[in-house]
Image: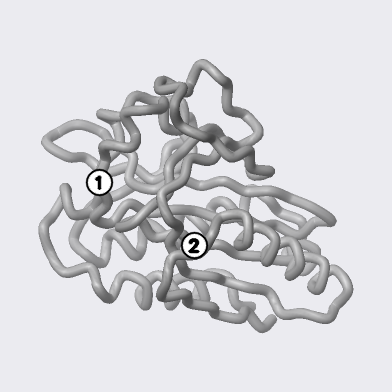
């Protein structure tokens, strides 16, 4: 299976990105397009997944874009790495649990390569780290399934500002339980994208 790698250097509008993913999904369904991994970041924006509730918005002055992905409300912006994919599960035994497991594995392997211990949590989807002996979330996962093709993706906090999270209950938890890799360990993360892509291909390319 060929997975196309797409990297955007400039911030990408959220709605345009989702339309691109949905177009690619249709192309894959019609056997006209390759699967996709797209690395990018968004201009500052709040998005709400299919499970979020209005009381998770703490500041009513913000605008929240409804998203078709699973999960709750979150924020995207500068310093955060967003990883979108479009993967055909018909070629992967229609196994959603294995898909999530491989996504988690990809993120964990990449973070651990920076000597930061991270792990998944069955009760709270996403990837977690320990900072000053406190468990904090560093990566969020949100997926949508259509025609047995999985899309949307995951986001990883590299060195973004955490203040925007104070306006919401991010992923249904308090903002003080969210962190960044830079807060865990001050080091150079410029190669993070390339390491992530390498791990993703290793875990998903058949």
Q: How many marks?
A: 2
Residue farthest right in this picture = 30
Q: Position of residue 57 (x, y in %)?
A: 47, 23
- Residue 25, picture quadrant: bottom right
Q: Is residue 161 left or right of residue 20?
A: left
- Residue 179, picture quadrant: top left
Where disc 1 sits, the SS reads loop
Given this view, does label 1 or label 2 mark the residue nearer the observer? 1
Q: Is residue 178 left or right of residue 121?
A: left
Mark 2 Cα shell of 10 Å, populated few (<14), some (14-19), many (≥20)? many
Q: Residue at x 49, y 38 (%)?
A: 125
Q: Residue at x 40, y 23 (%)?
A: 59
Q: Earlier in the sequence, mark 1 or mark 2?
A: 2
- Asked if 130 appears above or below 4 in the picture, the reply is above
Q: Residue at x 46, y 45 (%)?
A: 45
Badge number at residue 161: 1
Q: Position of residue 128 (x, y in %)?
A: 33, 42
| Residue under pointer 2 | 83
């Amino acid at each position: 299976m060929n997975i196309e790698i797409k990297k955007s250097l400039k911030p990408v509008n959220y709605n345009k990105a989702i339309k691109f993913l949905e177009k690619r999904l249709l192309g894959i369904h019609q056997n006209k397009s390759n699967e996709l991994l797209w690395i990018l970041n968004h201009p500052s924006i709040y998005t709400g997944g299919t499970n979020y509730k209005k009381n998770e918005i703490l500041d009513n002055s913000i605008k929240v874009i409804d998203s078709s992905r699973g999960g709750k409300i979150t924020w995207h912006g500068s310093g955060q790495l967003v990883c979108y994919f479009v993967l055909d599960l018909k070629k992967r035994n229609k196994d959603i649990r294995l898909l999530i497991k491989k996504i988690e594995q990809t993120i964990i392997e990449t973070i651990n390569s920076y000597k930061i211990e991270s792990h998944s949590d069955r009760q709270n989807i996403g990837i977690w780290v320990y900072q000053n002996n406190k468990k904090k979330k560093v990566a969020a996962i949100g997926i949508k399934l259509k025609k047995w093709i999985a899309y949307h993706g995951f986001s990883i906090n590299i060195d973004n500002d955490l203040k925007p999270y104070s306006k919401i209950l991010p992923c249904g938890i308090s903002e003080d339980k969210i962190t960044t890799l830079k807060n865990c360990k001050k080091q150079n993360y410029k190669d993070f994208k390339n390491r992530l892509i390498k791990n993703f291909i290793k875990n998903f390319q058949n």
